[in-house]
Image (spheres, rainbow, N blue to C red):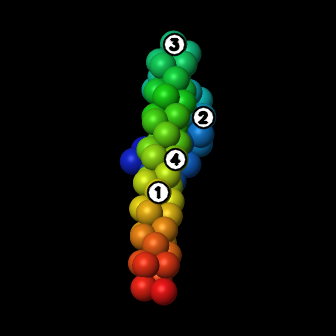
Amino acid sequence: MILYLLYTEPSRLITFMTRTKLMTDYQNDILVGAFFISGIFALLAGVLIISVALFTGTAYFSTAHLGLQLES
């Protein structure tokens, strides 16, 4: 059940582990911080992927546009 909650709903996992006394408040704070930091890294990775895709697309289309200008 813990792995299911980890992949589907991390906030419910934290609530479950705190209420069942599997974690202390200190461990809960560390887990929340780890989720926050990993979320920031995931956001930055997503931005990097989007920017690479946009850069590649604009470079491709500007090259195609330049090729059309050279032909005419």
Label 2 to label 3, Cα distance in Å?
A: 14 Å
Answer with mark 2 or mark 3, whichever residue precedes in sequence: 2
Element under disc 3: helix
Label 2 to label 1, Cα distance in Å?
A: 42 Å
Mark 2 or mark 1, which is nearer to you? 1
* Vertical relation: 58 (above or below) 45: below
Label 1 to label 3, Cα distance in Å?
A: 43 Å
How many neighbours does mark 4 have within 10 angstroms: few (below 14), some (14-19), or many (20 or more)? few
Label 4 to label 1, Cα distance in Å?
A: 12 Å
The mark found on residue 15 in the picture is: 2
Mark 2 or mark 4, which is nearer to you? 4
- 37 and 44: which is toward the camera: 44
Taking the spot 42% from the left edge, 85% from the top edge, the residue there is: 71
- Amino acid identity at mark 3: Tyr
- 64 and 55: which is toward the camera: 64
Name the outermost residue toward the top: 26
- Amino acid identity at mark 2: Thr
- Amino acid identity at mark 4: Val
Instruction: State whether residue 53 appears in this view.
Output: no
Spot occupied by residue 17 in the image (x, y as percentages of width and height): 51, 32
Element under disc 1: helix
Spot occupied by residue 72 in the image (x, y as percentages of width and height): 48, 86
Q: Which residue is tagged 4?
A: 47
Q: Which residue is tagged 1?
A: 55
| In this picture, residue 2 sits left or right of residue 39 | left
Q: Which residue is tagged 3?
A: 26
Element under disc 2: helix
Taking the spot 39% from the left edge, 48% from the top edge, the residue there is: 3
